[in-house]
Image: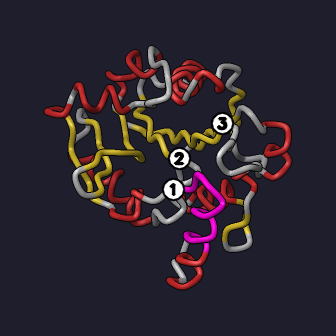
Amino acid sequence: MSVNILILAAGASNRFKGCKQLATIQGKTMLEHTITRLSSLNKKIYVALGANKDSIMPHLNTSITTIACANWQLGMGHTIAQACEKINLEKSAILIALADQVLIPTSHYLALLQAQITYPNKIIVTTAGDKVMAPAIFPTQYVEQLKGLTGDKGAQKIIKNNLAQCHFVPCQKAQYDIDTQEDYQYLSNKIKNEMEPV
């Protein structure tokens, strides 16, 4: 089964007090930083945009397909649902990633894809400690559930309702995301100090 990639970057970044998708990470915008790590997987990449769409689009490579999500303000669930309506997932799984999980290395995305090959009918979920989170891969049989999502919780509901049908891949760095300026400064310094390769 083929895999498409959906990067969620539609939020208004209210707690960040600015457009966090355009904050600089290793000389790239945050969104470009995440796209760079995912691009080496050689999969079709879609980016779901919303609040800052007009500001973000000029910074994206023309090879990236953007999806304008009019209902982004209703929550991540609505964004995922609207994006999945616009992607042909009839014979494809979908890897859902977050633009602000900037510490996740390419090696983890590769591990998720390898697990998907081994367990093609399972949801492949990232874990950090006892928490389940994105990025995650959903096989095609869950597409209708993705299209029916609402609210702020994203695809967590689907994962938690189907734990027996999940395969878990640990990545402690997935627990870090950027919501505030303090998060941004901390993770920017962490990346710089670690010299994490993309």
Q: Which residue is drawn at 51% across and 56% down?
A: 177
Q: What amino acid is labelled 1 in the image? A: Asp
Q: How far apart are marks 1 and 2 (CA)?
A: 9 Å
Q: Quick one: label 1 or label 3, which is nearer the N terminus?
A: 3
> Which corner quadrant holds the C terminus?
bottom right
The quadrant in which residue 178 appears is: bottom right
Mark sitting on residue 177 = 1
Magenta stretch bounds: 178-188
Mark sitting on residue 98 = 2
Q: Where is residue 156 in the image (x, y as percent from the top left)?
A: 35, 33
Q: Quick one: label 2 or label 3, which is nearer the N terminus?
A: 3
Q: Quick one: label 1 or label 2, which is nearer the N terminus?
A: 2
- Secondary structure of the residue carrying numbered label 3: loop
- In this view, the residue in front, 141 or 18, is 18
Q: Which residue is drawn at 66% across and 60% down?
A: 181
- In this view, the residue in front, 132 or 107, is 132
Q: Is residue 20 left or right of residue 111?
A: right
